[in-house]
Amino acid sequence: MSDASLPSPSGEGRETRGTRPGGGDDRYAAAGDFPTPDPSPEGKGRHPTPPILTVVAAALVDADGRVLVAERPAGKHLAGQWEFPGGKVEPGETPEAALVRELAEELGIDTHASCLAPAGFASHPYPDFHLVLLLFACRKWRGTPRGRDGQRLAWHRPNALFALDMPPADRPLLGLLAALLLTGPAGETLQSTHRSTRP
């Protein structure tokens, strides 16, 4: 894809938080990152509602119809599993702005909110929080994806993703993603329009 065909990012929500080595943050947060809910008379005798963590992720689709996944590095929650790249949505940040920022921080690529198509969402409980994952498909970006935190990257056909060891929040999205990428509304096979800019 040529640089001219990519809308200029507005810069909204692109500030670096620096909570992850090399910039950015991890998708999953430790329990200590969440405030403890204030007790109330109405809540007595009930289990406290775990905090909800909203994260965004991208299914980057190349010209051959393959999808990019990243391996969670050693020392992180769910280390060794493969996931769609992305991260947490910060307060006051739209999901699209968060994903544009995360892709720049995590993979060193630039895209725009208008290049992100909603592909589905997943809701999964963890012991200390409840994860809501918003997945977007992206076929247009500028640059070559690289694991800026040292994470391994791999391109796979949509159907090959089912054989990977993936986090429980990502796995329910595989069927939706495969259906979206492999067939259109009338059952026709779709082709990716992405052409990455090689340095």
Image (cartoon, grey):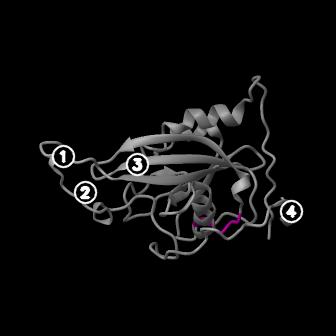
From mark 4 to mark 3, how far is it between C-alphas? 36 Å
Task: Identify the residue under disc 3.
Answer: 131
Q: Is residue 82 magenta?
A: no
Can residue 159 be seen by looking at this rendering?
Answer: no
Disc 3 to disc 2, C-alpha distance = 17 Å
| Marks 1 and 3 in Cβ contact (< 8 Å) | no
Residue 84 is left or right of residue 67, and the answer is left
At label 1, the amino acid type is: Gly
Mark 4 vs 2: CB contact within 8 A: no
Residue 80 % position (x, y): 43, 55
Residue kind at label 2, given as amino acid type: Pro
Residue under pointer 4 = 2
- Name the N-terminal-most of marks 4 and 2: 4
Q: Which mark is residue 37?
A: 2
Looking at the image, which is closer to me, 183 or 99? Answer: 99
* Residue farthest left in this picture: 45
Taking the spot 55% from the left edge, 56% from the top edge, the residue there is: 70
Q: Secondary structure at mark 2?
A: loop
Q: How much space separates mark 4 and mark 2, taking CA atoms?
A: 49 Å
Closer to the eye: label 4 or 2 = 2
Instruction: From the viewer's perspective, tell me whether residue 169 is left or right of residue 189.
Output: left
Q: Choose the circle earlier in sequence order: 3 or 2.
A: 2
Give residue 43's mark. 1
Dot 3 alpha-carbon crowd within 10 angstroms: few under 14, some 14 to 19, many 20 or more: many
Task: Give the image location of residue 166, x and y in percent.
Answer: 46, 46
Q: What kind of secondary structure does the magenta stretch mostly adopt?
A: loop
188 displayed left or right of 107: right
In the structure shown, which secondary structural element does the residue marked by tag 4 occupy? loop
Task: Please state the horizontal and vertical placement of residue 143, each as a whole percent of the image.
Answer: 74, 66
Magenta segment, which residues?
106-110
Total number of numbered labels?
4
